[in-house]
Amino acid sequence: MDAGCEYNGYASDITRTFPVGPSGTFSSPQKELYAAVLQVQKRLIQLCTESAGESLNSLHSRSVQELATVLTEIGFDLGAGERRMDILYPHFLSHPIGIDLHETNGQRHQTLVEGQVVTIEPGVYVPPDPAFPKWFHNIGIRIEDEVLVERDTAQVLTVNAPKEIADIEAVCQGLVDVGPY
């Protein structure tokens, strides 16, 4: 679910993937793919600091490389190179967020600076294509958080929205009340 709101003139944007169905649990392939995307997202969030010297373009390039690595580890053959990654990961990793939901993309090449807020939203969407492992067909995973860039740390502003597998399953099973933020 990709959702957002506006509060005091500022925009918000968040995405969470959750299992649908009576069990409230991810299937094994869903869980494996989700864990891979989450691992990459967490590493990229750590780089959202001024001192890291990254830009949105460089973070996106890293996201493509890191997703390719974890997907290969779980059984994807990406031998055809970037074309297959373009199919699996067809969108850009991030966008600045503020008064507008998608602040100008002209900032993509500029290094991140303290006080900026950006999204980090890797995603993998597996079509029913014989080029990809059958057990992952028709699974889509996207995890998006808003991140405040600080000098030496990255502060996740959407921290109260569960994204760990166990937490999401607990919410879907009604075992945990997330309540209002």
Image (spheres, rainbow, N blue to C red):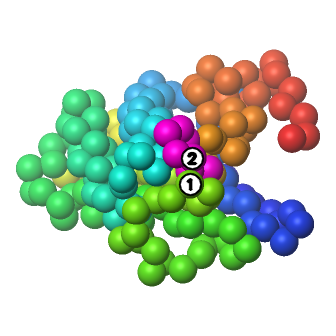
Q: Tell me, yes or no, if residue 120 can be seen here.
A: yes
- Sequence-wise, the earlier of marks 1 and 2 is 1
Report the number of numbered marks. Answer: 2
Q: Which amino acid does label 2 sit on?
A: Glu
Residue bearing the label numbered 2: 150
Q: Residue placed at 46% from the left, 59% from the top?
A: 112
Camera-side residue: 105 or 72? 105
Say few, some or many: other residues with alpha carbon within 10 Å of mark 1 (under 14 / 14 to 19 / 20 or more).
some
> Magenta span has 137?
no
Residue stretch in magenta: 148-154
- Please provide percent x and percent y for residue 28: 45, 25
For label 2, the SS is loop
Camera-side residue: 134 or 178? 178
Q: What residue type is labelled 1?
A: Glu
Quarter where residue 59 is shown: bottom left
- Please provide percent x and percent y for residue 108: 41, 71
Lateral position of residue 69 relative to residue 38, left or right = left
**Circle number at residue 114:** 1
